[in-house]
Image (tube, rainbow, N blue to C red):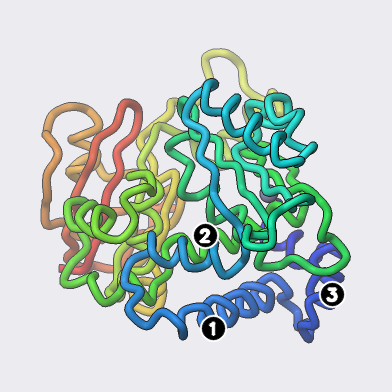
Amino acid sequence: MSPTSLKRSHKIHSLASDLGIRTSTDPVRDIVRFCEKRVARFLKDFPDCKTLSQLLDISASKLGTKFEEIHSDDQLNDVRTRYLQCGERSFASLHEELAPDVFGITFKRLSRKPWELPYVSVIDCRLDKKYRSYYTKWHELGHLLILTDQMRLAFRRTHFGLDDKDPEESLVDVIAGAFGFLPDLIQPVAKGRPSFEGIEAIRMQLCPEASQQASIIGISRAWPTPCILLQAQLGLKRGERRDIAQGDLGFHDRPIEVLRATQVSPNNAARASSLVIFPNMRVPDRSIIHKVFTGSAVDGQAIEDLAWWESSDGSRLPAAKVLVETRGGRDDVRAIITPQ
Ligand SMILES: [Zn+2]
């Protein structure tokens, strides 16, 4: 769901009011702030919390859930049997519930002992789902952070890859994104200029369970100094895509894909400064990003000028020296761009 339609969603507005939040024009931001205040209160009892993994564990115990990680089918059977023996009948269909697009489920315990936590969050870590486990855990906690009396018995699931998600699922993803890489914990260790190596070191220190890819996005976003994370892939101009979609072109008129900045993620500090690259701009041939893509250079760093970047209307970005660091993938190149 797009950020704009999420903001306007009736379900999100009524959720905010159920949570006792006075709604503004942006209920999503209001709800995230509400969650931030709750987590800040959890942390008051744990002033020594320094890592994101600790924050996750503290939040889980404060929200009353226990994570059950499932790494194999055998483990799935064990967890299912264990909870069924405790009288949790909803675990009977756990196999079917953990469908390919479901990454986690939080159950309310219906027959728990007085000393047991009121919820259990089953985290599917089988096969490729293991790369999402950190995010899935935050997603499940996101549901518990916004739980109201009206929804207390419902199951919570995580679906990925669905274009039109339920508004609550989309909201919980926003919440998971806010806490999974909380700037308050990242900024004290984010020293100097961000680099792929520096970000990986912070990942290992703060949240080794998080995937490398998610950490590059989340940690660069939280970095206190300006940087742009960019992904370059082959692509067409917007107008060319439209012509193809409308079937206006003959076979020989087909435009050729060139290397473009398909994803551009400036962090807050970059937004506040003049560091800018526009999405879908063509990557200059002389940039290290282009050279790594074509194989004429290996990954590394280069000092470049943003004035090399040209828009489709021929205008250039203002001159600014930047340091560009690359990581080439199978069909893309990622780059961290910082002011020189
Ligand atoms: Zn969910």
Above or below, 160 relative to 74: below
Q: Which residue is mark 3?
A: 18
Residue pictured at 19% horizontal, 60% vertical = 305
Rendering coords of residue 255 (x, y %): 49, 26
Q: Nearer the viewer, residue 190 or 258?
A: 190
Q: Earlier in the sequence, mark 1 or mark 2?
A: 1
Rendering coords of residue 54 (x, y %): 39, 64
Residue pictured at 46% horizontal, 83% vertical = 45
- Cα separation, mark 1 vs mark 2, equals 19 Å
Closest to the camera, between mark 1 and mark 2, is: 1
Q: Nearer the viewer, residue 31 or 150?
A: 150
Marks 2 and 3 in Cβ contact (< 8 Å): no
Above or below, 163 relative to 95: below
Q: Which residue is mark 1?
A: 41
Q: How many marks?
A: 3
In screen coordinates, is 32 left or right of 165? left
- Cα separation, mark 3 vs mark 1, equals 20 Å
Q: Quadrant of residue 233?
A: top left
Residue 308 showing in the rendered view? no
Q: Quadrant of residue 145?
A: bottom right
- Cα separation, mark 2 vs mark 3, equals 23 Å
Closest to the camera, between mark 3 and mark 1, is: 1
Q: Amino acid at mark 1?
A: Arg
Marks 3 and 1 in Cβ contact (< 8 Å): no
Q: Nearer the viewer, residue 216 or 52?
A: 52
Q: Amino acid at mark 2?
A: Gly
Q: Secondary structure at mark 3?
A: helix
Q: Amino acid at mark 3?
A: Asp
Q: Which residue is mark 2?
A: 177
